[in-house]
Amino acid sequence: DTAVSQTPKYLVTQMGNDKSIKCEQNLGHDTMYWYKQDSKKFLKIMFSYNNKELIINETVPNRFSPKSPDKAHLNLHINSLELGDSAVYFCASSQGLGAGPNYGYTFGSGTRLTVV
Amino acid sequence: AQTVTQSQPEMSVQEAETVTLSCTYDTSESDYYLFWYKQPPSRQMILVIRQEAYKQQNATENRFSVNFQKAAKSFSLKISDSQLGDAAMYFCAGGDGNKLVFGAGTILRVKS
């Protein structure tokens, strides 16, 4: 039933580890996004994919690597985790490249990543 | 590029009263869309209301309405008959190319 689902919801890991967050949407949307919400609740885009093609790659360390095996999935892999990576990571989707800025996104419930 | 500014870090309202959350934006686009999102403690991001800039009429969704002043680049959210369930973080957002840009958010507290 869930339109945009992320797993896991919580992730606690040690510095230096590698971890992945998975996102799937069943809305038939063709554009997906990763946003990072920091400790001050500020939301900033990291990546977007349209039909498996990378569209937006904001200034993000190359330790972060998104992968979109198909238009319904967008995963985020993070290498060599650092304390500053602790945040909530949101996946979102929209139909069409322009639809997100026009119609808004459907968000997943977020993944709270804590690096210790 | 779009910038979105929310100048009120926190607001309080008495249950059943009305509250207005402020947002200003800056854009070079001639046609754009603006949004208010709600983030309750559950952390889920929920779309509250959407405004198309070319429409003169202010958007309304039940108890939620906007005051869109295009010349002033202002987009405030009015919540009428506030309920305890309205307590949340509210984000203003605007389209910038192929992405949404969010303001810093306003925490709304509802007192019973």
Image (tube, coloured by chain):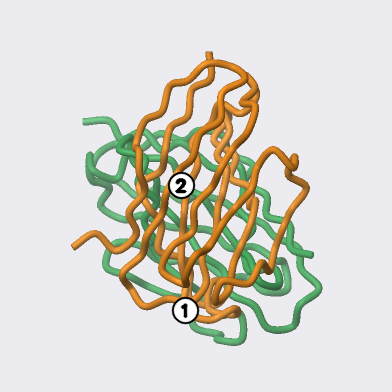
Chain colours: A orange, B green
Judge left or right: residue B107 versus residue A2.
right
Q: Which chain carries label 1?
A: A
Residue A107 location, x and y as percent?
A: 41, 57
For image coordinates 36% across by 56% down, the residue present is B46
Q: Which residue is drawn at 58% across and 33% down?
A: A38
Q: Is B2 in front, or is A7? A: A7
Count numbered badges in the picture.
Answer: 2
* Label 2, residues with CA under 10 Å away: few <14, some 14-19, many ≥20: many
Of residues A42 and B33, the one nearer the viewer is A42
Q: Which labelled disc corresponds to residue B111?
A: none
- Rounded to the nearest angstrom, the CA distance separating label 2 from label 1 is 24 Å
Horizontal arrangement in the rendering, residue A102 relative to residue B99 (left or right): left
Residue shown at the point (53%, 72%) measured from the top left: A100
Q: What residue type is labelled 2?
A: Tyr
x and y percent of residue A39 in the render? 56, 27
Q: Mark 2 lies on which chain?
A: B
Secondary structure of the residue carrying numbered label 2:
strand
From the viewer's perspective, tell me whether residue B111 is left or right of residue A102: left
Q: For mark 2, what is the residue? A: B90
Label 1 element class: loop
Q: What is the x, y in percent for residue B63?
A: 29, 62
Q: Residue at x 36, y 30 (%)?
A: A10
* Image-based side of A26 in relation to A95, left or right: left
In front of the other: A38 or A89: A89
- Which of the 4 image quadrants contains residue B111? top left
Circle 1 residue: A95
Give neighbour class at mark 1: few <14, some 14-19, many 20+ (Cα, 10 Å). Answer: some
Q: Quadrant of the N terminus of chain B?
A: bottom right
- Give the amino acid type for the residue marked by disc 1 in the picture: Gln
